């Protein structure tokens, strides 16, 4: 099973809402990643979790809060987002942290009104 | 700061043609280079990963080469098919922080029947 799943597929939220994105993998991978991708742009790294600990935070605003409850699950909690945060949010995982093939999920398309 | 550029930005070819996609990066201190495919609104699929010590990798009709000293990689697609239509992204991981992928600007490929 080389699948990374993400839920929901689509999300519409207001600027005062709180929502969460979920990512799951059952490949035994020890690194998980969140990326943000705007239309017609390449993905940009947001966070890296290595062995369930946050190892990289690319200066992401605090309205995005990642969480790794266990080695298979990665969440991204959203609060007080801005319309410019509308994007495709991609989750990925790799066997080890760094230098390995990353397996991507299908993404969550987020629209902030 | 590592910058990754892909040329051309868009390419349209008839079915059956062999084609070459180009990727260049400014900092040759890379850990590896990966090529990904992305269908519209979808996640990324890893195609090939080339370690910095390797010169090329092959998978089916795909062949990727790496010239680290000149900061260049090419993706060769043989006998293109309409199903190859997608955006192709190259990404490098750095020796200084190999958990982080820096993506190129992408090439949008359209193969017409």
Image (spheres, coloured by chain):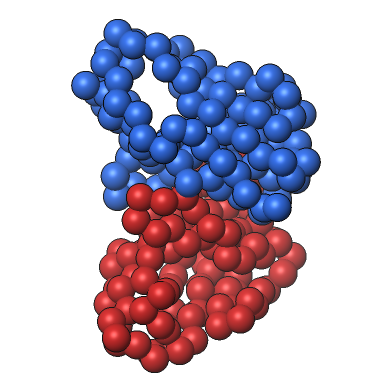
Chain colours: A blue, B red
Q: Quadrant of residue B69?
A: bottom right
Residue depicted at 36% across the width and 71% down the height: B85
Taking the view exactly as shown, the residue that stands out farthest to the left is: A113
User: Residue A20 location, x and y as percent?
Assistant: 47, 20
Residue depicted at 64% across the width and 78% down the height: B58
Q: Of residues B72 and A60, which is closer to you in this image?
A: A60
Q: Quadrant of residue B12?
A: bottom left
Q: Of residues B65 and B112, which is closer to you in this image?
A: B112
The answer, for residue B96, to whether it is visible in the render is no
Vertical placement of A105 versus B83: above or below? Answer: above
| Quadrant of the snapshot with the C terminus of chain B | bottom left
User: Residue A63 location, x and y as percent?
Assistant: 42, 13
User: Residue A26 location, x and y as percent?
Assistant: 72, 41
Vertical placement of A110 versus B94: above or below? Answer: above
Vertical placement of A17 versus B76: above or below? Answer: above
Q: Is residue B110 left or right of residue A31?
A: left
The answer, for residue A106, to whether it is visible in the render is yes
């Amino acid at each position: 099973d080389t699948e990374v799943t993400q839920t929901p597929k689509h999300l519409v939220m207001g600027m005062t809402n709180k929502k969460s994105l979920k990512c799951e993998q059952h490949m035994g991978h020890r690194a998980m990643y969140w990326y943000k991708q705007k239309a017609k742009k390449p993905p940009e790294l947001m966070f890296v979790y290595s062995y369930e600990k946050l190892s990289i935070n690319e200066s992401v605003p605090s309205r995005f809060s990642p969480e790794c409850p266990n080695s298979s699950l990665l969440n991204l909690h959203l609060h007080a987002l801005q319309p410019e945060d509308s994007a495709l949010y991609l989750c990925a995982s790799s066997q080890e942290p760094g230098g390995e093939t990353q397996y991507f999920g299908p993404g969550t398309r987020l629209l902030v009104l | 700061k590592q910058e990754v550029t892909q040329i051309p930005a868009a390419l349209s070819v008839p079915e059956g043609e062999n084609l070459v996609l180009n990727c260049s990066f400014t900092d040759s201190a890379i850990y590896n280079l990966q090529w990904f495919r992305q269908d519209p609104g979808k996640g990324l699929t890893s195609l090939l990963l080339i370690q910095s010590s390797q010169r090329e990798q092959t998978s089916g009709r795909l062949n990727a080469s790496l010239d680290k000293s000149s900061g260049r990689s090419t993706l060769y697609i043989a006998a293109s098919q309409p199903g190859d239509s997608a955006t192709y992204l190259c990404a490098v991981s750095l020796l200084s922080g190999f958990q982080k992928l820096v993506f190129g600007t992408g090439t949008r490929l359209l193969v017409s029947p």
